[in-house]
Amino acid sequence: MKNTRLIYLLILLFLLNSCRQEKGAEKKSSEKTETVVMGKLQDGQMMEVVLEEMGPREYIPVDTVGCGEEGEFHMAFSQQNTAFYVLRTGGSGYLTLLLEPGEELQVKGTYGQPASFELKGSPGSEQLVLLDAEHKRVLVELRALSARISEARSLDNYREIRLKLDQKLDSITTGFHYYSLNFIEENSASPVMLIALYNLYGRDFPVFDPETDFAIYLKVDSLLQLSHPKMDASRELHSQLMELRSSMNKNTASSSMAIGQFAPDFVSSRPDGTAMSLSGLRGKWVLLGYWASWSKPGREDAEVLRKVLEEYREANFTILQLSFDSEREDWTNAIEELGLDWYHLSDLQGWDSPVADLYQVERIPVYYLIDPTGRIASEGLEARELSNKLKQLLDK
């Protein structure tokens, strides 16, 4: 389908796109730091090792060195921004790396066999090795299943065999799907999660299908907007997803926002700068509200929210408000001034916040009630409806 092809194009663009960070723990654009990649490779005596950066449309040569008599090699280069690289050691295989400026990566393994490499000194690269190993293991299993299906075509009981093999295939892909979800959760502050998001089982067979897993794409987008908002790949992902979101005619959001469906998860920043996810409140009744300090109706709702929180606090109930402010001081001052004593989040991107698209927020203030299992119990509420709706649902 057209929409699917668009997201696959996005995947290919990312895999060729360098990742540049400019905020928080990222290096300032004016700074350059020496990064070192070194190691010792069995059977690598006098062989070449090549390091390339993933550029916007091509691999950019960084360094090529020859191994010593014992397979040792050493390369040092000036690095300005965090980026993805590939390390080639003969043959068609290569190792994908995520290097931070100033890291000293140590590599040990057998020349020409990237799967044997052990890494130390680069946390992002080490995580990519783990993901790559599991991905390759799954691909081997899937190829073996495909071969068994082909061999069984001439048998009389082909239908019966095919059914069992299809069930096995579903078990393998489902398992890796959840492995990838967990990988994204555990690496939610690192660009390595993009590799997990964009992995494929084969041509036109993604681990995360954009038509059924669109909320996952948007969640990763919100994480990147929080931790790497000025990174080239982050900007590209956001703009492409918004374009795709528009082309899908809001079908994904409308289907995912129905009462009884799980509320799309997202991650944003608290006033103190720490990250928090909607799913972190799982187990409670949550009133999820959207507002902004400049919204007069949003400010006027403060008294209503205080009353419902006081009335239902003992009923395992809490409030989470996400602000569409763009200035931190305006946002935090309003929280203090109005006495909004509950959870608050904002990525300070105004209406460009990924969450606005995720929940298709077209007006503020607006509220959603989410039950303890994470499902939407009521949507599109206004302040005047809150007390009756909470009494109806929570008293039950």
Image: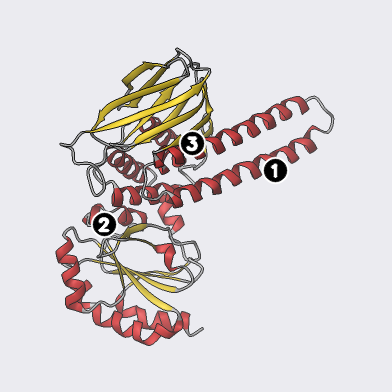
Residue beneath the point at 39% across and 38% down: 121
Secondary structure, mark 2, is loop
Amino acid at circle 1? Gln
User: What residue does disc 1 label?
Assistant: 167
Please give the label number shown on residue 129. Answer: 3
Residue beneath the point at 42% across and 56% down: 254
Q: Nearer the viewer, residue 99 or 389?
A: 99
- In the rendered structure, which disc, 2 or 1, sits on the residue that comes first in sequence? 1
- Binning the other alpha carbons within 10 Å of mark 2 as few (below 14), some (14 to 19) or many (20 upward) gives many
Amino acid at circle 3? Val
- Binning the other alpha carbons within 10 Å of mark 3 as few (below 14), some (14 to 19) or many (20 upward) gives many
Please give the label number shown on residue 190. Answer: none
**Residue 299: quadrant of the picture:** bottom left
**Residue 161: quadrant of the picture:** top right
Q: Position of residue 224 (x, y in %)?
A: 32, 47
Q: Residue furthest right?
A: 156
Amino acid at circle 2? Asp
Secondary structure, mark 3, is helix
User: What residue does disc 2 label?
Assistant: 347
Q: Position of residue 120 (x, y in %)?
A: 43, 37
* Apparent side of residue 41 relative to residue 58 in the rendered image (left or right): right
Q: How much space separates mark 3 and mark 2, taking CA atoms?
A: 31 Å
Secondary structure, mark 1, is helix
* Apparent side of residue 20 relative to residue 186 in the rendered image (left or right): left
Report the colour scheme. secondary structure
Whether residue 348 is situated above or below residue 228 in the rendered picture: below
Q: How much space separates mark 2 and mark 1, taking CA atoms?
A: 42 Å
